[in-house]
Each structure stands twice: as structure tokens, then as C-alpha cells.
Amino acid sequence: MSGMEPEHNAATVIEDPRIQLPAVAQRNERIARKGFWRKLARVAGKIPFAEDATAAYYCAVDPGTPMGVRATLFAAIAYFILPADLIPDMVAALGFSDDATVFATTLAVVGSHIKEHHRARAQRTLQRSAADEA
């Protein structure tokens, strides 16, 4: 047992707007909106979670997504973008493992909010990007 009462599981805690720190959420959103595409362009071919990250971005910027979910997704995206990492991204074979873990954990908690249209848009964006590079 986790010690949490059933009505206080991770998903309900994340979605509780009283839990979110507005200044931190706004900072993460600014970081994500400013740096996501630049970072993704540099590393998309090196990471196996590019499509999940892109779908998460589209879900985070979707005004129909609940605020707590948006804040959680923006936090994961900001972690991916920021250079201060648990495992630096330039470390061969391990550099993005912490980023992948952050995304996997985030998606386990709020992934049900990433809808098919977010995923389809992510696929189109990545396919277009790959075609532009070819």
C-alpha cells in the first residue's frame, strides 16, 4: 500500500489545482513553448520517445486539456529541454534515459488526456520533419 487514501491517488493529486504552483507552471510553460521545437529538431532521430514527447506537447498547448494535466506535461517537457539533467544528454547510450523515464512516468499518470488527434498531429509533424531532412 502507498499510504494514500483511495481518493488521493496520483492522478487526482496531479489534477488538483491547489497542488500546482502557478509560478512554476508558468515558467515551465514558457520554457516548453520557447525551446521544445529547437530541442526536438536536434535530437528527434536519437530518442525513441519523440512521438510521445510531441503528442505531449500538443496536448499541453491544447486549451481543452485540464490545467493540472497541462502543468504536468509542461514540467516533463521543460525537464527534457533544460540542460541541467540528472544524466547529461551527451552521455552516449544513457543521456536521454532520464528524460525517457520522466516522460514514461508522466504519461502513466496523465497519458489518458493525450487524445488521438494529438498523436495524429505528432505523427504528421515528425513525418514532415523527416521528409524535410531527406
Image (tube, rainbow, N blue to C red):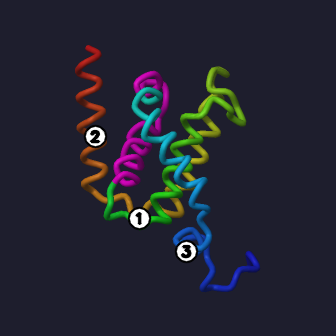
Specify the segment rendered in magenta: 41-61
Residue neighbourhood size for the residue with mark 3, other residues' Cα within 10 Å, grouped as few (<14), some (14–19), many (≥20): some
Q: Provide residue 6's location: percent of width, then percent of height.
A: 63, 85
Disc 2/disc 1 C-alpha distance (Å): 18 Å
Q: Which quarter of the figure has residue 111?
A: bottom left
Q: Provide residue 36's location: percent of width, then percent of height.
A: 44, 35
Residue where numbered disc 3 is placed: 16
Q: Provide residue 53's location: percent of width, then percent of height.
A: 44, 43
Residue where numbered disc 2 is placed: 123
Of the two numbered discs 2 and 1 on the same chain, state the one appearing first in sequence: 1
Residue where numbered disc 1 is placed: 112
User: At label 3, which amino acid type do we have?
Assistant: Asp
Residue drawn where x is 55% and y is 47% of the image: 27
Of the two numbered discs 3 and 2 on the same chain, state the one appearing first in sequence: 3
- The N terminus lies in quadrant: bottom right
User: At label 1, which amino acid type do we have?
Assistant: Ser
- The C terminus lies in quadrant: top left
Is the magenta region chiefly helix, strand or loop? Answer: helix
Is 37 left or right of 7, judged from the image as shown? left
